[in-house]
Amino acid sequence: MQAQPTASHFIGGKYIEDTSGALIESRYPATNEVIAQVHAGTEAIVAQAIEAADTGFQQWRTSTPAQRAAVLNKAAQIMQERNRELSQLETLDTGKPLQETLVADAASGAEALAYFASIAATMTGQHIALGNSFALVKPEPLGICVGIGAWNYPIQIAAWKAAPCLAAGNAMIFKPSEMTPLTALKLAEIFKEAGLPDGVFNVVQGAGETGAALVSHPRVAKVSLTGSVPTGTKVAQLAAAGLKPATLELGGKSPLIVFADADLDNAVGAAMNANFYSTGQICSNGTRVFVESSVKAAFLEKLVARTKAIKLGNPMDESVQLGPLVSAAQLARVQEYIDIGKQEGAQLVYGGARAEPSGFANGNYIEPTIFADVQDDMRIAREEIFGPVMSVLAFESEEEVVKRANATGFGLAAGVFAGDLQRGLRVVDALDAGTCWVNNYNLTPVEMPFGGYKDSGIGRENGLAAIQHYSQSKSILVELGDVEAGW
Ligand code: NDP
């Protein structure tokens, strides 16, 4: 299988190659075959991207809100029309089943473009009457923004960052994860076809080093990263050195709390979504499933029965529900955590082994895995695994579970299942998490701001909140009278 792009980078409206950069191989996680090769951005490529982005920005900043909206809307439409082709490419790059990529990746990116097109068209300032003078307050773009993506939702992350960035009149240089370099290039092609001026959206490949070079560049005004907490800390430090704002969407170890009066079938379905979707490689996953003791046995029985029925295999087969992990390294990491869970004394109630579906024996497959009797101090309950490994913990009271749910440095997300809605809302209010769900889990509509508390991040993506992170306000006082000078 081949998915070789025209060239590694997309800068100034065209594909650019520079083979002197380190070789990056993209592998299809279901077979580990190399499907494409690109080269990391060198210093010269970074410099070229900055020049192109600056040229693009000077033109784009003078466009009207309606013009920006038209381009973003057109890009959304093209993305929707090409959804299948983009989804197949995303499946090749990430291994996520086509069943998922068809609905959750380019489709979600297109929604973000359409949503921020509407916002672009409505961006206005303020007039403040001050007697003999008045003030104008107007939103202005920041300049060149850098977006850095993780490998789990490559095109979605690129679009979620580009949409508010461009809507507010900025230019972007996007660096995908070296693990998944392909679909951001397609987004760049789509923007060009939609009429975006050259240089307003650029893609530079590379690993952490290239990301760091972009963040530290003196002509970069802002950075938005999706990645792990350690990378977030490094990027925040680099951004702080240049006094640049940083939006950080980082990791989590989120709680999903199931009270005894909840609809157990819904709670089980949500727990499965919250741990097995995208083979568990989702930052907001509810990986600590707290179940009230009186319903724990019934919950586990339903959970195991439904987990047994999960279809794992060929990601391109639309009936397949679980694909491989993104890389052999991620597989090794998840297997290590499963071993740790067993050694720590958690009860393995389902899965735990490597899977070798027919025709895909070399893929990075692992069975969906459920641990019960997990204790709060076990590593599998404290550390982000980023694989399909669910920990079920029992609890007795509301007060106790809130305290335990909050006893983590992370604060990305949380879910509560409760028949008593007053209780559901009361518990959500007490949880330290930026994104919460009552009686559902992991829904991220573009209208709703998404982001974390504590170590899980700074700032928000999506919703009206995102646009604020990509604009600054200029206040202008206009004098209609005389200047009063004291001398
Ligand atoms: P990493 O933190 O390893 O990498 C994220 C991105 O940052 C990659 O593009 C990486 O490049 C780049 N990078 C690494 N080091 C630096 C640096 N010093 N300066 C600038 N950029 C750098 O995360 P993963 O790709 O492994 O993704 C998994 C993590 O992302 C998980 O912890 C997960 O929770 C989190 N995540 C958070 C989400 C959220 O919205 N909160 C959503 C999805 C994932 P490269 O990898 O190419 O070396």
Image: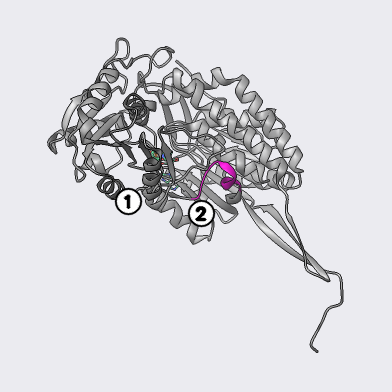
Determine whether, in the image, residue 161 is placed left or right of residue 456.
Answer: right
Up/down of 237 relative to 6, above or below: below
The amino acid marked with disc number 1 is: Gly
Ligand 1: which quarter? top left
Q: Position of residue 111 (x, y in %)?
A: 59, 31
Q: Residue furthest right?
A: 481
In x, y percent, where is residue 311?
33, 15
Q: What stretch is highlighted in magenta?
A: 459-467
Q: Is residue 12 visible?
A: no
In the picture shown, does residue 402 fall above or below 149? below
Q: Which amino acid does label 2 sit on?
A: Ser
User: Magenta stretch: residue 463 in it?
Assistant: yes
Mark 1 vs 2, N-terminal side: 2
Quarter assignment of residue 7: top right
Compared to residue 396, the image places residue 430 above or below, namely below
Kindly tell me whether residue 58 is visible in this rendering. Answer: yes
Which residue carries the number 1 mark? 409
Coordinates of residue 263 in the picture (x, y in percent): 34, 28
Locate the N terminus by quadrant.
Answer: top left
SS label for mark 2: helix
Give the quarter of the image for residue 265: top left
Residue 216: image tag:
2
Q: In this view, does 371 lie to the left or right of 208?
A: left
Helix, strand or loop under label 1:
loop
